[in-house]
Image (cartoon, rainbow, N blue to C red):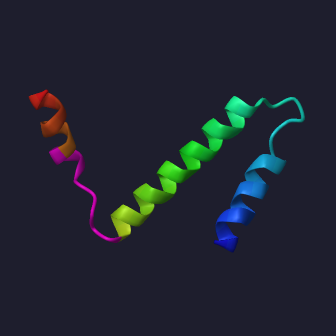
Amino acid sequence: MQLLREEVIKVISRMPESVDIDEVIYQLYVIDKIRKGRDASAKKDAISVDALKKEIEQW
């Protein structure tokens, strides 16, 4: 959990002084999705690009 806290602090500290709360929330959301995607990929819980394309075409 400490690693996540440190990452959040690092991201926020790189933002300009004039940043608004919506941008902070968005950036943290993106980081969360990237981390979850990496974790899923490492656990082999992700699908291939071809499988994703087929799913999209079926819609």
- On whether residue 49 falls in the magenta region, the answer is yes
Say if 30 sits above or below 42 in the image.
above
Q: Position of residue 15 (x, y in %)?
A: 80, 40
Query: Farthest residue toward the right?
Result: 17
Q: Nearer the viewer, residue 9 or 48?
A: 9
Could you say which quadrant of the image residue 25 lies in?
Answer: top right
Q: Residue at x 74, y 33 (%)?
A: 21
Quadrant of image for the N terminus: bottom right
Query: What range of the chain is rendered magenta?
Result: 43-51
Say if 58 sits above or below 24 in the image.
above
- On whether residue 47 falls in the magenta region, the answer is yes
Say if 56 sits above or below 12 in the image.
above
Q: Position of residue 3 (x, y in %)?
A: 67, 70
Majority secondary structure of the magenta segment?
Answer: loop
Q: Residue at x 71, y 56 (%)?
A: 8
Say if 40 sits above or below 19 in the image.
below
Could you say which quadrant of the image residue 57 lies in?
Answer: top left
Q: Position of residue 32 (x, y in %)?
A: 54, 52
Q: Is residue 45 left or right of residue 25?
A: left
Q: Is residue 59 left or right of residue 39?
A: left
Q: Residue at x 32, y 71 (%)?
A: 43
Quadrant of image for the C terminus: top left
Q: Is residue 23 left or right of residue 19?
A: left
Q: Is residue 18 left or right of residue 20?
A: right
